[in-house]
Image: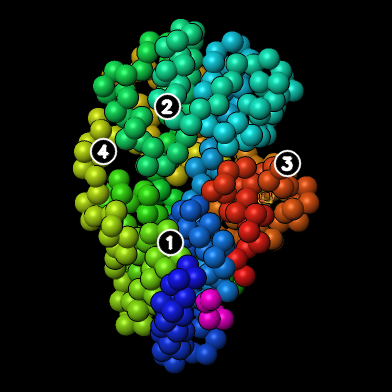
């Protein structure tokens, strides 16, 4: 970033000039809110202090960019039950520490389940789980948490028949466009706050979905949407493009991250996802059900589905209860309605070493990013 200091300075100046143009048109008190939708973008913004480079009146807010944060407590509780009953549960490291709101036999996380004798194994990918489950041959389940980025890998494993008979997939994959619609919609109705005027769209997700996934968002909310890469210069260029469009009264989708993202995306990956999964109304932790925002295995792959195989009841809108721990503002943080520092427990009762709420668990969680790097000015 230092070696690009001149470019960063030029972009900062450009953003400030465009903002002045907008204010000259809209009024001196006009404010602009720009939302990022990827935990890694938030990391870049915070780590490199990009908020401190924005003119006063331009606010960068984090959106729902962390799949672990939005995984309902319900499914963590079901995974704890499985592990305590002797089924081997494979999970990523961050989900291992995720706390459930309703303890199962006094056990509130997979980490505690393992300490209590449950069968929980940490893996970095589904491939590790396949290898290990094939070796021991016992009943097993892989917790498939993530956004569109992980779905192609899961889909290919399912379609190609790579999962051993004893390993089932619990697909908890979330789809990001419905969350983007929801976040922009609720912030639009908050009278004391400016609405989101521009979106930094997720770069990793867009490699799969293509930039075209965001066109309905730009159209419906009439805001610029820019797919950015993850270097600080990428993010600044994304913000500069948003300001350029706003100054001209334009809105549309632009790809800044052209080295990885195309308009159509990865068609092969999209086809694999479509073959293996169907989109369902799904619950987001602390937020509730969003239409067609999750992926479940199709009926024809039902024998590989952990939910069907173990007879696990799906969460429904009727059964759903707010599933963040008392006092935790993670849902508001996730939707850009609050900052981590607005939560009285931030860095007191809730720290990266001892996370109380879900946004503090994963490295992609906004609270965890702010805790490590200080909020980025
Ligand atoms: Fe929740 Fe912890 Fe973030 Fe507060 S600091 S909102 S308790 S995750």
Question: Contact, CB < 8 Å: mark 2 with mark 4?
Answer: no
Task: Give coordinates of residue 362: x percent, y percent.
Answer: 58, 43
Disc 3 marks which residue? Answer: 354
- From the image, state whether disc 4 or disc 1 is nearer to you: 1
Q: Residue at x 44, y 50 (%)?
A: 179
Instruction: Tell me which segment is drawn in magenta.
Output: 53-57
Task: Give coordinates of residue 217: x percent, y percent.
Answer: 34, 60
Disc 2 marks which residue? Answer: 126
Q: Quadrant of residue 72?
A: top right
- Magenta span: predominant SS is loop
Disc 1 marks which residue? Answer: 231
Task: Give coordinates of residue 212: x percent, y percent.
Answer: 26, 55
N-terminal-most mark, 1 or 3: 1
Disc 4 marks which residue? Answer: 269
Task: Judge left or right: residue 196 versus residue 278.
Answer: right
- Tell me how far mark 2 sits from mark 4, CA to CA: 16 Å
Q: Nearer the viewer, residue 280 or 161?
A: 161
N-terminal-most mark, 2 or 4: 2
- Tell me how far mark 4 sits from mark 1, CA to CA: 25 Å
Q: Residue at x 47, y 58 (%)?
A: 41
Residue 183 visible, this angle: no
- Tell me how far mark 1 sits from mark 2, CA to CA: 28 Å
- Tell me how far mark 3 sits from mark 2, CA to CA: 27 Å
N-terminal-most mark, 4 or 1: 1
């Amino acid at each position: 970033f230092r070696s690009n200091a001149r470019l960063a300075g030029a972009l900062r100046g450009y953003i400030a000039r465009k903002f002045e143009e907008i204010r000259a048109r809209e009024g001196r008190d006009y404010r602009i809110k720009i939302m990022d939708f990827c935990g890694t973008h938030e990391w870049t913004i915070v780590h490199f202090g990009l908020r401190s480079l924005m003119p006063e009146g331009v606010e960068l807010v984090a959106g729902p960019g962390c799949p672990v944060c939005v995984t309902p407590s319900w499914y963590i509780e079901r995974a704890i039950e499985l592990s305590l009953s002797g089924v081997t549960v494979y999970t990523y490291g961050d989900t291992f520490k995720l706390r459930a709101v309703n303890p199962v036999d006094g056990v509130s996380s997979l980490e505690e389940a393992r300490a209590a004798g449950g069968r929980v194994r940490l893996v970095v990918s589904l491939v590790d789980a396949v290898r290990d489950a094939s070796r021991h041959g016992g009943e097993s389940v892989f917790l498939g948490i993530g956004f569109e980025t992980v779905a192609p890998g899961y889909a290919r494993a399912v379609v190609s028949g790579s999962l051993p008979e004893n390993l089932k997939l619990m697909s908890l994959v979330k789809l990001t466009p419905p969350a983007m619609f929801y976040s922009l919609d609720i912030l639009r109705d908050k009278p004391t706050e400016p609405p989101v005027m521009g979106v930094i769209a997720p770069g990793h997700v867009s490699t799969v979905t293509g930039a075209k996934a965001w066109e309905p968002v730009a159209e419906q909310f009439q805001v610029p949407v820019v797919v950015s890469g993850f270097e600080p210069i990428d993010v600044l260029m994304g913000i500069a493009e948003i300001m350029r469009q706003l100054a001209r009264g334009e809105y549309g989708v632009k790809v800044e991250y052209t080295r990885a993202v195309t308009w159509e995306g990865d068609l092969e990956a999209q086809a694999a996802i479509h073959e293996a999964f169907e989109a369902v109304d799904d619950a987001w932790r602390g937020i509730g059900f969003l239409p067609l925002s999750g992926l479940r295995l199709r009926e024809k792959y039902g024998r590989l589905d952990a939910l069907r195989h173990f007879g696990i009841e799906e969460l429904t809108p009727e059964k759903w209860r707010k599933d963040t721990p008392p006092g935790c503002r993670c849902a508001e943080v996730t939707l850009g309605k609050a900052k981590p520092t607005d939560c009285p427990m931030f860095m007191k009762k809730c720290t990266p070493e001892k996370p109380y709420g879900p946004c503090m668990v994963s490295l992609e969680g906004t609270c965890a990013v702010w805790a490590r790097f200080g909020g980025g000015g």
